[in-house]
Image (tube, rainbow, N blue to C red):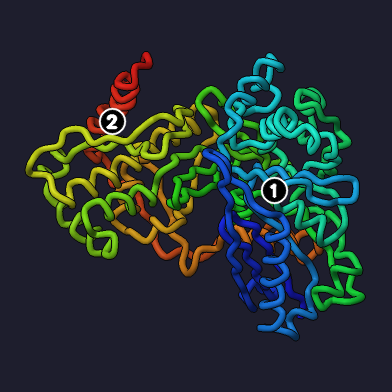
Amino acid sequence: MPTYLGLDIGTSSVKALLLDERQATVAEATVPVGISRPHPLWSEQDPEEWWQATLTATARVRDAAPEAWQGLAGIGLSGQMHGAVLVDGEGRVLRPAIIWNDGRCAAECRELQEKVPDFTRRAANIAMPGFTAPKLLWVRRHEPDVFTATRKVLLPKDYIRFRLTGGYVSEMSDAAGTLWLDVDARRWDDVLIEACGLTRTHMPDLVEGSELSGHLSADTGALLGLAGRRVPVAGGGGDNAASAVGIGATRAGEGFLSLGTSGVLFAVTDRLTALPERTLHAFCHALPGRWHGMAVTLAAASALTWVATLVGRGGDIAGLLADVELFAESERNRIHAPLFLPYITGERTPHNDADATGLFAGLRAEHGPEALTYAVLEGVSFGLADDLDVLNEAGARLDSCMLVGGGSRSRFWGHMLADILGLPLDLPAGAEAGAALGAARLGMLAAGAGSEAEICRKPPLRERFSPRGPDGYAERLARFRKLYHAEKATRGTPA
């Protein structure tokens, strides 16, 4: 029976997921990886550690299911976006990878936008420190010898592809996050590349995520216990695009809301929908002929963890949420609860303000842990309402939306979000699919294991949270939206 491997090169771990032809899990393994922060704002990882973690994860999967492993018929890749892996002409890594949450490149972002007057039109996004292009300007300025020796710039999962196949290849969804791609035309943009002192020769080749990118090399096949096997490797996808494939969000109007550390609203579109001035991320999907809009609230489930720890309930979040649900049964409690601005780690959409801060407004002596936690859940939901407003303004509508991530375990929060967003939210049954499943599905498509409709099906649903009509949140949302400008004014910056 053929099997298919999904590899997800994440920030905290590398995950390997082996599926059979019915997409049942045969074996899986997760291996942690570390992050180095040698200076303030820096965030780096060792690509060799990713590779060793990949070898360890695949070995564990192979050992757990040796017979199924020998039926491996396709591999797909997903991974953290925006990282910069610099290699020389022999494929040797020249320095640690600068990853997505590195913040050293603010000056280089301004330089890029000044160098290319129509930058946002070309890139469909504003320049932000996390993206790949400003990282290369920083290396050019501060590490000129490394810059001169660089022959290829690879994204994290594409470095693993190089180790698997020997080829320098990327795909559209991940490449869109470099700020070097013409996102609409799905090809490299020479003007954007040259603004960083590079040429197209520094870029990998491009394929669609569901297309063949290469085959396991003979040496790597032997290393993985697959000697003599010519296993196809799919283009794959950036982590969010791969996750969308994993939950069947493949057509325009479909998407997901992820309540992880951050909150992500992801909407599939059949055309480019860009709104960079409101910090909408406009990227290609991992499937041909589709794009996606993505809006990000930087603190979501992490804000709940923060307030639970603050009120001494960090070890009993489920119990705290049960108390909050009782608190919210009273209309008076809801009306007079404090308001919370959830920008405790800055904010992305719609403000693009790393200096934004959180605050509680309307605090009274009567307010206890339940009131504060209710305000946090509501404040994060209001932030996501701003995100939905940006998606709607750009024309990236959401007709159906899966609710995923750690925060989705709270039914109370699911109902609140549906009411505030005015959007039905579908909760998948079973474990969260994640990017590794999407990667494996892309591997199946590249191997010709079935059609997109057959392979990228939606999971069964556990529950649907439907909006319950007039919800009483409108007045509080209007007050919430004034809070950001008040907070900004306290920093001495005109609102």
- Residue drawn at 80 percent across, 80 percent down: 70
- Residue drawn at 33 percent across, 54 percent down: 305
Between 465 and 353, which is closer to the camera in this rendering? 353
Give how far across and how far down residue 106 sits, in percent: 58, 27
Q: Secondary structure at mark 1?
A: loop
- Residue drawn at 44 percent across, 55 percent down: 426
The residue that disc 1 covers is: 96
Amino acid identity at mark 2: Phe
Q: Secondary structure at mark 2?
A: helix
Between 401 and 63, which is closer to the camera in this rendering? 63
Give how far across and how far down residue 52 sits, in percent: 71, 66
Residue 414 visible = yes
When the figure is inspected, residue 470 is found, relative to residue 316, above or below; the finding is: above
Q: Nearer the viewer, mark 1 or mark 2?
A: 1
Choose top left, top right, bottom left or bottom right for residue 361.
top left
Residue 154 visible = no
Give how far across and how far down residue 218 sits, in percent: 91, 69
Query: Which quadrant does the C terminus fall into?
Result: top left
Between 47 and 125, which is closer to the camera in this rendering? 47
Query: Which quadrant does the N terminus fall into?
Result: bottom right
Residue furthest toward the bottom? 67
- Residue drawn at 26 percent across, 64 percent down: 316
The residue that disc 2 covers is: 480
Q: Is residue 401 left or right of residue 488?
A: right
Amino acid identity at mark 1: Pro
